[in-house]
Image: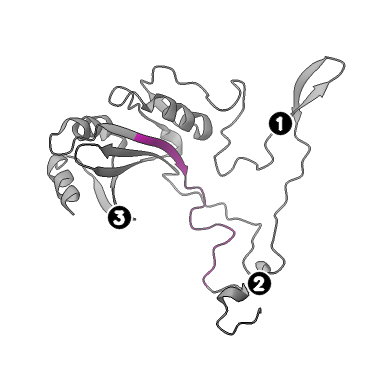
Amino acid sequence: MVLLELLKASLAKFSIKSDVKFSQVTLEVQREDWLQVAKILRDDKALKFDTLIDVCGVDYLHYGLSEWASSSVATNGYSRARSDLPNQVREPRFASVYHLLSTSENHRLRIVIALSSDQLFIDSACSIWPVANWFEREAYDLYGIVYEGHPDLRRILTDYGFIGHPLRKDFPLSGQVEIGYDASKQGCVYRPVDIQPRVTVAKVIRNDERYNPNGTES
């Protein structure tokens, strides 16, 4: 792939892993090198990644060890479901992912920067691509990734007093608080959530007869 060769030549001095996934080049960049790499990707005349399309966070907690992990073909929900996930935590647990576009060269690029739980911070890309502003605020809000040098890093989707980061894998599905109207205070108040968490398991998984070569439903 031509783009991959150009990237290797322009970023030769950095320790970078490269791969092609889903017909798109992916680079794994070290956290301390990110801002330098970003400037090269934007300014290098052979690359010209002038547009930042998206920034998102990723939580790899229990990656590959989910309740649906199975080494054999399952015939019903009970054979695969697990409610006792292992305590093993993958590190680095988090990642900040950037998607770039070169409008002149028609190249697309994915950048993945791995971040450990005890060093959950990375240089903001706002000085390179100003559009990163709200994207990075969202990743901070939902995952707790701190973007150093960001001009206005605060929550963007949840309340300013919200506790926790709701897209982390260990955040409870039912949340931690709920809001309701308090007649005595004549206003809405937060209180501990009263929903009891539970694991939903499919009782039966049936094959669709449209895809059954015998023409009968099993």
Up-down relation of residue 173 to residue 159 (above or below): below
Instruction: Give the Cα separation between the discs numbered 2 and 3.
Output: 33 Å
Task: Mark 1 or mark 2: name the one nearer the start of the chain.
Answer: 1
Task: Mark 2 or mark 3: name the one nearer the start of the chain.
Answer: 3
Amino acid bearing label 2: Arg
**Residues at circles 2 and 3 in contact by the CB criterion of under 8 Å:** no
Residue nearest the observer in this picture, 124 or 41: 41
Question: Is 56 inside the magenta-drawn segment?
Answer: yes
Residue identified by numbered label 1: 177
Find residue 126 and report its horizontal and vertical position in percent: 33, 24
Instruction: Give the Cα separation between the discs numbered 1 and 3.
Output: 42 Å
Residue identified by numbered label 2: 206
Find residue 120 and report its horizontal and vertical position in percent: 43, 33
Task: Mark 1 or mark 3: name the one nearer the start of the chain.
Answer: 3
Q: Which residues are magenta?
A: 53-71
Q: Is residue 96 left or right of residue 88?
A: left
Give the position of the C terminus as an image quadrant.
Answer: bottom right
Q: Residue at x 46, y 38 (%)?
A: 117
Instruction: Give the Cα separation between the discs numbered 1 and 2.
Output: 37 Å
Mark 1 or 2, which is nearer the eye? 2
Mark 1 or 3, which is nearer the eye? 3
